[in-house]
Amino acid sequence: MKGNKNHLPKKASFPFAILLCIFLAGCEMDSFSIGPFTITTSTASAAYSDEDMIRARITTFTEAYNNGDLDEVLNSFATRPGQQIRSTINVAQNCGGSLLQKTIGVGSGLQFSDLFRIGTAMMTEGDLITIEISEIKIEEKSAIANGSMTYREKAAFNSDIVHEETANIQVILVKEKSDWYIQDIQPLAS
């Protein structure tokens, strides 16, 4: 093989196979074959329990909301509600963008995600929302997480007074492609 630049030396094939395994594991493939060998991979969901993944999804949603990261907030939702929210935002942005530009001179380059980030930053110092989960009921492809959500906001823009309200909530989740996503968040009657 000396001088043949089109082939990797045999020593490189084993590390390449390991890298391929790691890559394919991240792609959620259960197994693949290399020549006469079949290699079984484990996906991320196998490493964590459903309850761990549900708690992680709710934490991701909460952190994204508090950081004003609209894209990550929307990525926390299941496909159907996530697409509906994105569509609504697009319509509002497309229609409202030209209206904002005409009425108050705000440029049409302003995105709703920018407004979301600015709004969450102005609402309060620290976390705007916190979610504490007390119980999770899991079925095969759906789950309900019961708990409480605390919402904090400044009483006025330049005020030091912070209004805080806590409510019991129910987070409804669905399992899509071996991970959990939020379907809805509903207040519970006290």
Image (cartoon, rainbow, N blue to C red):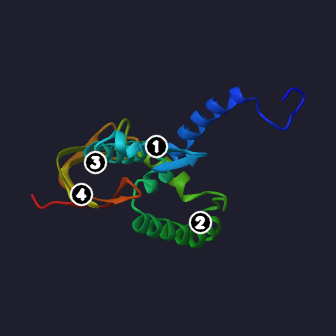
- Are the residues at dot 3 and dot 1 in contact (C-beta closer than 8 Å)? no
* For discs 1 and 2, the disc positioned in front in the rendered view: 1
Q: Which residue is mark 2?
A: 100
Q: CA distance from mark 3 to mark 2?
A: 44 Å
Amino acid beneath label 2: Leu
From the viewer's side, name the closer residue of 157 and 50: 50
User: 10 Å neighbourhood of mark 3: few (<14), some, or many (≥20)?
Assistant: many
Q: Earlier in the sequence, mark 4 or mark 1?
A: 1
User: 10 Å neighbourhood of mark 2: few (<14), some, or many (≥20)?
Assistant: some
Q: Earlier in the sequence, mark 4 or mark 2?
A: 2
Name the quadrant of the C terminus.
Answer: bottom left
Q: CA distance from mark 1 to mark 2?
A: 52 Å
* For discs 4 and 1, the disc positioned in front in the rendered view: 1
Whole-percent x and y of residue 69?
48, 47
Residue situated furthest right in the rendering: 3
- Are the residues at dot 3 and dot 4 in contact (C-beta closer than 8 Å)? yes
Residue 157 in view, yes or no: no
Q: Earlier in the sequence, mark 3 or mark 2?
A: 3
Amino acid beneath label 4: Ala
User: 10 Å neighbourhood of mark 1: few (<14), some, or many (≥20)?
Assistant: some
From the viewer's side, name the closer residue of 138 and 110: 138
User: 10 Å neighbourhood of mark 4: few (<14), some, or many (≥20)?
Assistant: many
Q: Which residue is mark 3?
A: 50
* For discs 4 and 2, the disc positioned in front in the rendered view: 4
Whole-percent x and y of residue 55?
29, 44
Q: Which residue is mark 4?
A: 143
Q: CA distance from mark 3 to mark 1?
A: 19 Å
Q: Which residue is mark 1?
A: 41
